[in-house]
C-alpha cells in the first residue's frame, strides 16, 4: 500500500504563524528600505521640470516654394503627411544643432549638472571618458569634441520631446536643478525651432525666386526671338501690322 503526502493548504492562520517567526526580518527590511529612501531624498539634488508646448501649424497651400511650383497638386492635410511633419519637427527639437545652440546661448556649461561631479550622469560621463585627443584650450564648444560630447550627453538625458497623440502639439520637457534654467531651455528650444522653420522657408522662397527669374529670362529671350522672326516675315511678305484691331477684333494690316 502506497501513501501520498498531500501538500498543506495555505491559510491565513498559517501566514500569521510564518509572520510571527519571521517578524524581525520583515520589520528590519522595511526599516532599512525606509532609511535608504530617506537618505537618498536628503542627499540627492532637487530637480525641477519645465514644460513647453509647441503647435505645428498646417502648411498653407499658397506657400511660395519650388516644390509647390513644380508639383501637380495633392492633399496637404493627409493624415500620414501630417504625422510625418510632426515627427520631423520633433526630431529637429532633439537634434544636436539645436542642443548646442541652446547650451551656448544659456551658458549651460556653468550649470550644476554640467560641472564635473555635479550630477550622477555627469560623474558617470567623467568616469568613462570617450577615447580621443584632448580638447584645445579656450575654444568654443563646437570646436571641442570632448566637451561637446559630454555636454550633449547630459543635455539629451535631461530632455524629453514627445508629440501629443491626435493633435499637432509637441511637448518639450527639461529637468534641471535650477528651475529658471529649465524654463529657459524649453523656451530657447521652441524659439530655435521657429527660427529653423523660418530659415527653411526663406531658403525655399529664394530658391523659387531664382527659378522664376531663370524662367522669365528664357521667356523673354523666346519672345524677342519671335518678334524678330515676325519682323523678318513681314519684311519678306510686304504685309505689316498696324498694331490696331477692327470692329470684329481682327488685327489690321496693310501691304507695302
Image (cartoon, rainbow, N blue to C red):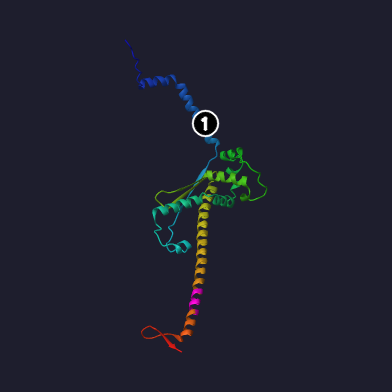
Residue 197, percent from left and from top: 50, 57
Residue at the spot 50% in from the left edge and 64% down from the top edge: 208
Q: Which residue is drawn at 53% across and 33% down?
A: 39
Q: Which secondary structure lies at badge 1? A: helix
Query: Which residue matches tag 1?
Result: 36
In the image, residue 138 lies in the stretch drawn in magenta:
no
Total numbered circles: 1
Magenta residues, start to end: 221-228
Question: Is residue 227 shown above or below 166?
Answer: below
Query: As drawn, which residue projects farthest toward the top?
Result: 1
* Residue placed most toward the observer, 6 or 45: 6
Q: Can residue 111 be seen in this view?
A: no
Q: Which residue is the extreme one toward the bottom?
A: 256
- Magenta stretch prevailing secondary structure: helix
Could you tell me which residue is drawn at 46 percent across and 24 percent down? 26
The stretch drawn in magenta includes residue 225: yes
- In the rendering, at what x and y percent does residue 150 appear? 59, 44
Amino acid at each position: 500500500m502506497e501513501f501520498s503526502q498531500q501538500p498543506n493548504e495555505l491559510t491565513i492562520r498559517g501566514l500569521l504563524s510564518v509572520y510571527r517567526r519571521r517578524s524581525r526580518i520583515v520589520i528590519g527590511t522595511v526599516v532599512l528600505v525606509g532609511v535608504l529612501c530617506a537618505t537618498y531624498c536628503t542627499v540627492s539634488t532637487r530637480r525641477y521640470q519645465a514644460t513647453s508646448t509647441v503647435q505645428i501649424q498646417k502648411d498653407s497651400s499658397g506657400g511660395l516654394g519650388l516644390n509647390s511650383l513644380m508639383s501637380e497638386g495633392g492633399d496637404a492635410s493627409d493624415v500620414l503627411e501630417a504625422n510625418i511633419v510632426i515627427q520631423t519637427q520633433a526630431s529637429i527639437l532633439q537634434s544636436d544643432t539645436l542642443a548646442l545652440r541652446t547650451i551656448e546661448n544659456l551658458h549651460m556649461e556653468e550649470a550644476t549638472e554640467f560641472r564635473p561631479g555635479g550630477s550622477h550622469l555627469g560623474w558617470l560621463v567623467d568616469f568613462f571618458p570617450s577615447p580621443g585627443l584632448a580638447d584645445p584650450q579656450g575654444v568654443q564648444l563646437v570646436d571641442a569634441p570632448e566637451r561637446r560630447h559630454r555636454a550633449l550627453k547630459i543635455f539629451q538625458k535631461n530632455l524629453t520631446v514627445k508629440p501629443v497623440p491626435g493633435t499637432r502639439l509637441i511637448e518639450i520637457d527639461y529637468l534641471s536643478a535650477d528651475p529658471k534654467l529649465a524654463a529657459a531651455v524649453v523656451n530657447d528650444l521652441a524659439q530655435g525651432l521657429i527660427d529653423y522653420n523660418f530659415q527653411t522657408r526663406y531658403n525655399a522662397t529664394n530658391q523659387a525666386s531664382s527659378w522664376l527669374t531663370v524662367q522669365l529670362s528664357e521667356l523673354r529671350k523666346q519672345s524677342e526671338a519671335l518678334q524678330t522672326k515676325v519682323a523678318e516675315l513681314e519684311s519678306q511678305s510686304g504685309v505689316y501690322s498696324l498694331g490696331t484691331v477692327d470692329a470684329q477684333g481682327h488685327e489690321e494690316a496693310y501691304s507695302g
